[in-house]
Amino acid sequence: MNLNRRKFIQSAGTLALGSAVLPAKATGLFKPAKHSVGVQLFTFFNVIDEDVKGSLTKIAADGYKELESAFSKKGGYYGMKPKEFKAMANSLGLSWKSHHVLGAPFKLPDGAKMPTMPDGKPMVIPPMPNLQENMQQLVDEAAEGGVKYLVCANTPTATLEELKSSINVLNKTGEAAAKAGLTFAYHNHDMEFKPIGDKVPYDLLLTETDPKNVKMELDLAWAVKAGKNPVDMFKASPGRYPLWHVKDLDASRENIMPVGSGTIDFKPFFAAASIAGMQSFFVEHDMPKDPFASIASSMQYINKNINV
């Protein structure tokens, strides 16, 4: 059974979503890219741990240049120490730019069960460090790995009490990250846009975190699903969005698609990239049947239709 990522992360936080830009190799048909295309490795959650180097080799062959890592079933950084993973990525021509971490201890939603593996047994996952309990460890490991960005993939925001606690953790992490030479950011899903009384969690995440230390990684698709216009968000908080995730959605807004295969018009968003302050973006597809086919399709669309 494929892991339903939205349920997997709903109550505590998890791994990540994606975004993309132009490839480093531009043909005569296209203008040279100002940004390299990145990929969020959660796209490969079900396969990457079987052959990490082989997976990264295929990713590089499709023209991707930047990586954002996420949780691994092997634990650590796909079974490696930060410097080891960085060395492997670099040897394949890939730049490890960003890493996703949980904001709070992971727990399954009420009534949910761990997905089963091919052998029929429930998935067993190693302990997952989180910012609430292991902030300095995660900051130190990111600094050791030489990434530029540390990103909170998800944190509890279902109640005002949870939100207050999460904002406190985010501000403390932002301070620690800055001291370590990192840029810290928060990654959204659609749940942060669901009001709690007269309060919208995402609005509070923006206004009650320090804009110098806590940036935003905007998942364009989840924002669109929530009824938001990313361009309006960029204009309201210019320069606050250095990272993006790029994935597509079908007409129902329930099913994730490769970039360019769904209904989202990405061109206006990328036209406003300078307003957002976008520095990197990462293509992502949560739990696709064939992740390599998905990222190849996304890259093909980006090459032909997106220029940043």
Image: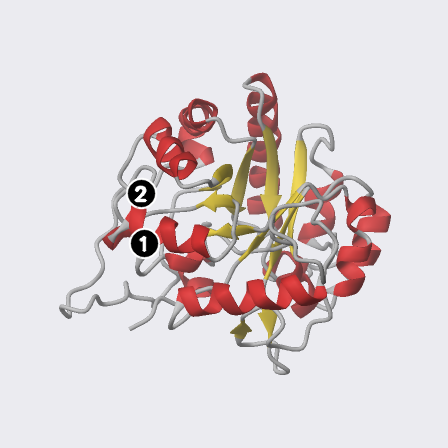
Q: Is residue 235 left or right of residue 114?
A: right
Secondary structure beneath dot 2 equals loop
Q: Is residue 280 left or right of residue 70?
A: right
**Could you say which quadrant of the image residue 21 lies in?**
bottom right
Q: Which mark is residue 178?
A: none
Residue sitting at x 30%, y 46%: 53
Estimate how packed mark 1 is, as few (under 14), some (14 to 19) or many (20 or more) residues with alpha carbons within 10 Å.
many
* Location of mark 2 (residue): 78
Q: Secondary structure at mark 1?
A: helix
Residue type for callout 2: Tyr
Residue situated in front as seen by the camera: 62 or 7: 62
Could you tell me if residue 92 is visible in this image? yes
Give the quadrant of the N terminus: bottom left
Specify whether residue 287 is in view.
Answer: no
The foreground one among 2 and 81 is 81
- Residue visible at 33% across and 70% down in the picture: 2
Q: Is residue 76 above or below residue 24?
A: above
Residue wearing tag 1: 48
Task: Answer left or right for 286 relative to 50.
Answer: right
Local crowd size for mark 2, using a 10 Å CA cut-off: few (<14), some (14–19), many (≥20) = many
Name the residue nearer the viewer: 10 or 73.
73
Circle 1/circle 2 CB separation < 8 Å: yes
Q: Amino acid at mark 1?
A: Ile
